[in-house]
Amino acid sequence: MADAIQPEPATAPALGWKDGAPVALAFDDPYFSLKGGLEETRHVFLAGNDLPGRLRDGFHIAETGFGTGLNLLALALAWPGGSGGAARLRFTSFEAFPMAAPDMERALAHFPEAAAISAPLLAQYRTGATEIALPGIDLHLVIGDVRQTLPAWGGQADAWFLDGFSPAKNPEMWGEDLMESVARHTAPGGSFATYTAAGHVRRALAAAGFEVARLPGFAGKRHMSAGRLRG
């Protein structure tokens, strides 16, 4: 697969657990919504990027924060090209603290409807692979601090899932420099979506070149953000 970056040594995150969801102790933040992780991903990242309607062979999604891999699973479930067809998506995910395989397996057991995708993901992830082939999707995991790995990346994404922990608890994932890097690595007409509507994040994305919209959030959250790169 193209655009490879050599992974750096990384430490698995310290976790707590709440109602089946892992919580990153360093940020005191869950990896997915306790009110419905798959539904949250579909609302925020898929619908926010007008997916699956835009998907096509070679479409490239990039993500800040792989976490449990749930966003990838939701995408795979929504991608008809993964049902034995030849069309394939590309998915690049930047992760500083890759979850230990047993913890990922425990988290994804919460979503039995995604078992057909999570099983081959986990089988390859356990080996330490960062290049993983799933039905209809080629995953590339980029391990390391995204502030370093994203600027060095040679790819461009058609859609971004901006899924770091809360900006209030993990501001390094949402700074102006990183949002500029996201824009530089977005294809013409490309999009982003994120669960946060924090003003400084929206301003950073707008300054980087995106048209930014504030949209209704998931499960009682008032707002989220999405947008397209200006031409």
Image (spheres, rainbow, N blue to C red):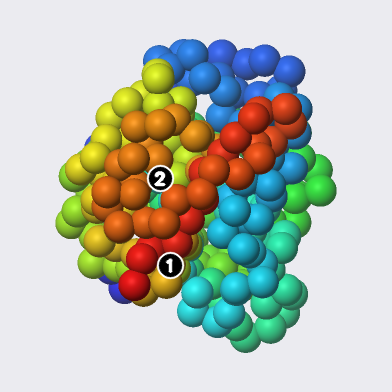
Query: In the image, 8: left or right of 78?
Result: left
- Around disc 1, counting alpha carbons within 10 Å, would you say few (fewer than 14), some (14 to 19), or many (20 or more)? many
Which residue lies most toward the bottom here? 86
Camera-near label (2 vs 1) is: 1
- Expressed as whole percent of the image width and height from the top left, the position of residue 156 reads 33, 68
- Expressed as whole percent of the image width and height from the top left, the position of residue 194 reads 51, 43
Query: Which of the pair 80/17 is nearer the observer?
Result: 80
Amino acid found under the numbered disc labelled 1: Gly
Query: Which of the pair 130/85 is nearer the observer?
Result: 85
Identify the residue at image location x=73%, y=73%: 80
Q: Which residue lies under the disc numbered 2?
A: 64
Screen quadrant of the N terminus: bottom left
- Expressed as whole percent of the image width and height from the top left, the position of residue 167 reads 40, 26
State the SS at label 1: strand
Work out whether residue 1 can be spotted: no
Residue 45: give its label: none
In the figure, 142 relative to 67: above or below? below
- First-in-chain label (2 vs 1): 2
Amino acid found under the numbered disc labelled 2: Thr
In the figure, 88 relative to 78: above or below? below
Q: Which residue lies under the disc numbered 1?
A: 190
Identify the residue at image location x=27%, y=49%: 207
Screen quadrant of the C terminus: bottom left
- Expressed as whole percent of the image width and height from the top left, the position of residue 20 reads 71, 23
Work out whether residue 22 can be spotted: yes
Identify the residue at image location x=40%, y=40%: 202
State the SS at label 2: strand
Query: In the image, 179: left or right of 196?
Result: left
Which residue lies most toward the right here? 113
